[in-house]
Amino acid sequence: MICGHEIFNILDIAAAIGETNLKKLLNDFSCPRNEEIQHFVRNHAYEFARKKLSVTYLVVNEENYISAIFTLAHKAVEIGDAQLSNVRRRKISRYATLDEKSGSYMVSAFLIAQFGKNYNMNVEKRMSGDVLMDLAFEVLGKVQHDIGGGIVYLECEDKPALLKFYQNERNGFTPFSERYSVSDHTKYIQLFNFF
């Protein structure tokens, strides 16, 4: 427990309170800064967890409200060699082999697929992004202990404030690629980190 918050796997919450009550709990989650996250939490998080596509973790405060969420998955990702420093090349070679033809490492990595705070909370009770990242890495550390691995990645919209947050000294993510989503006309930056 950090700062009066506990982390719960969405499947455990569903088993404890039932699907109907879980749906009510999830419908209170509001993220107007990123409606995609809000839509995912309200409409897909539980189903994705049931299908083992990803697992959403609910960060619940002492009043039993969702303060924030993060969703984790495991996925193969291609990280190009050209943009890596020598130090990062040495580290990544612990987890993958360089494909000489493509000039990339194909890595099995942990994906932080969704990451957001509940804006239905009062500003003074709202969780900071840094604390939420600590909680996500706490869960990832347990998974790493059980199954191994050492690389985590995420995608974020190409927005200066988001990139600054993920790349700051505390969080330490490094950009490695980008993609453009035709469906939502958005450019996403892909970033990775070691843990």
Image (cartoon, helix red, strand yellow):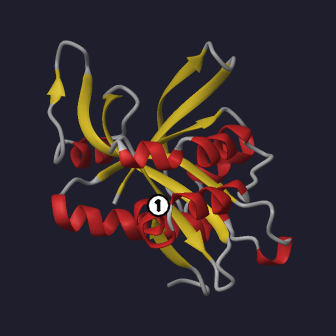
Would you name the residue on which mark 1 appears?
10
Q: Is residue 162 above or below residue 16?
A: above
Q: Nearer the viewer, residue 45 or 110?
A: 45
| Residue 32 coordinates in the image, percent (x, y) | 80, 47
| Residue 177 coordinates in the image, percent (x, y) | 47, 27
Q: Is residue 53 above or below residue 65?
A: above
Three-letter code for the amino acid on which mark 1 is drawn: Ile
Q: Is residue 100 left or right of residue 16?
A: left
| Residue 184 coordinates in the image, percent (x, y) | 68, 20
| Residue 156 coordinates in the image, percent (x, y) | 60, 38
Label 1 environment density (alpha carbons within 10 Å; few <14, some 14–19, many ≥20): many
Q: State the quadrant of the C terminus.
A: bottom left
> So how many labels did they put on this image?
1
Q: Is residue 18 left or right of residue 91?
A: right
The residue depicted at 72 percent of the width and 61 percent of the height is: 118
In the picture, residue 138 is in which quadrant?
bottom left
The residue depicted at 24 percent of the width and 49 percent of the height is: 91
- Element carrying mark 1: helix
Q: Nearer the viewer, residue 114 or 23?
A: 23
Q: Nearer the viewer, residue 71 or 152?
A: 71
Q: Is residue 17 above or below residue 193?
A: below
Tell me if residue 111 can be seen. Answer: no
The residue depicted at 51 percent of the width and 71 percent of the height is: 17
The residue depicted at 31 percent of the width and 37 percent of the height is: 75
Tell me if residue 47 can be seen. Answer: yes
Q: Is residue 82 above or below residue 64?
A: above
